[in-house]
Amino acid sequence: MDKKLRDTGIEVIGEAFWGTHIAQFYESKDDFFSIGCPYIRAGLLNNELCVWVYSNNTNEEEIKSYLEKYINNADSYIKAGQLLLEPHVDWYLTNNSFNEIRVNEHWLECVTKSTKLGYEGLRAVGDTSWLEKCYYRTFANYENKINKMLPELPFIALCLYDENKTDKLQYAEVIKNHSYTIINNENKKELITNIELVIKDKQLNKALEYNKVKAEFFANISHELRTPLNVILGTVQMMELAKCTSYEKEEKYLKFLKQNSLRLVRLISNLIDITKIDANYFEIHRKNLDIVNFAELITFSVLDYAKCKNIYIIFDTDIEEKVISCDPDYIERILLNLLSNAIKFTPRGGKILVSVHDMNERITISVIDNGIGIPVDKQKNIFNRFEKVDKSLRRENEGSGIGLSLVKLLVNKLDGNIYLKSQPSKGSEFIVEIPCMTTPETSEFNIENTSVNNIVERAKIEFSDIYC
């Protein structure tokens, strides 16, 4: 079905999709004609078959006279068969009783007729002024079914309700059974939107925003992939031209080749890891680990990167030893990523503090810098996948926008939490909280078997977009 927007002719609504079910509470005939006539006019101009089912509070001639105020030669549309004016007794009632089956047959016949005759769809007005209390519950159920059926049809409906005959319970039912409800409030028309429609709109907006973020991510990722590849290709070409007669030049070129190869390894590894986590294939290997000494070892492994930017790193702790159950690889990835960001976004001469605090049932590891900070409006989304503070392709620092989202996923897998405190131009603090528990059947992870050199090699991958 064609889902394009239709002009409703109703000022407070504007455009709406096929399947829209509208209600209006009116105070007088002038009131409902002020909505119904421009609504029908828009349908006629949109090449739609239009049906007006009127009640005993008006008649065909009166409707024609009101329509003439909005439509030139309205009678010609009636003669051509594009506009049908039907009394409610022929449409809604059988032997003076509401007949739901008959009504549905009428509407389906009109929808079929509209498409067969080459119209875009069906537009209807139905006045419920005839409705008696004894039919109210049955009619409300019918309206509820219509509201669910309409989205599948090229059909827009406007239902008119006399507010002088409607109690509070009926009022609520009408709002529930329609996409939009038009009411009078201090001589002004106001619109009430069905909560389900609000939720659908929010879901749609969320999906559109996610698609936008994905598009930005893929534009960014293509840039991230091209940059190291161009450097590698350019370096190879320079080596071919220079024929590497100088050892210093050869060493410089090899450094470029290695660093940009590591950038590609890091990017692809992060993409693979996120895919594995999404598919629930990312395994956790818990070991009992002295988290204090391990965090210190990781911090010391990146000192060279800090020195090349003249950044001073301090490690502090309020406890000498704390053995907890965790995955050493997870902790290493988390800390290296946070340290990489801190060094990347801290200006020369800045400071970074890594601290470990024992909170009894939880251990906290925080990484604090006095760098550029994060804008307040970006902080709530900083852990979202593909999210970057600076999304432009001419930003000062490299990055794909998946690092912190991966960090959060890893922290969550350790049953922990991660928090951010940041002030623009003053710096940021990332706080990781991990439960203090041990696994009896798990052997203790021997930090002595993990040399600084091994961590330094892994840090080269994580820090591959920082040039010294």
Image: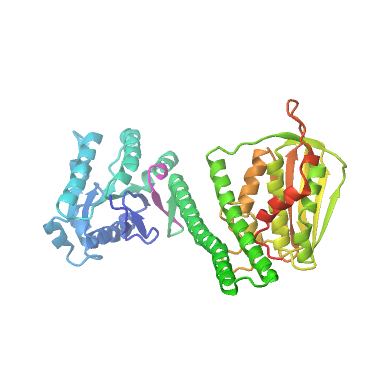
Indicate left or right for 279 with 434 as reference.
left
Instruction: In the displayed orientation, state which residue is furthest to the left.
Output: 79
**Closest to the observer, 265 or 357:** 265
Instruction: In the displayed orientation, state which residue is furthest to the top.
Output: 441
Which image quadrant is residue 323 in? Answer: top right
Seen at 81% across and 48% down, the residue is: 296
Which image quadrant is residue 139 in? Answer: top left
Relative image position of residue 440 (x, y in whole percent)? 75, 26
Q: From the image, which quarter does the C terminus lie in?
A: bottom right
Number of on-image labels: 0
Relative image position of residue 258 (x, y in whole percent)? 63, 60
Seen at 19% across and 59% down, the residue is: 64
**Closest to the observer, 46 or 367:** 367
Indicate left or right for 131 with 257 as reference.
left
Relative image position of residue 190 (x, y in whole percent)? 44, 56
Q: How is the image coloured?
A: rainbow
Residue extent of the magenta highlight = 175-185
Which image quadrant is residue 227 in? Answer: bottom right
Relative image position of residue 316 (x, y in whole percent)? 85, 50
Asked if one can make out residue 389 in the rendered structure from this viewpoint, the answer is no
Seen at 16% across and 48% down, the residue is: 113
**Residue 450 is inside the magenta segment:** no
Asked if one can make out residue 174 in the rendered structure from this viewpoint, the answer is yes
**Closest to the observer, 458 or 144:** 458
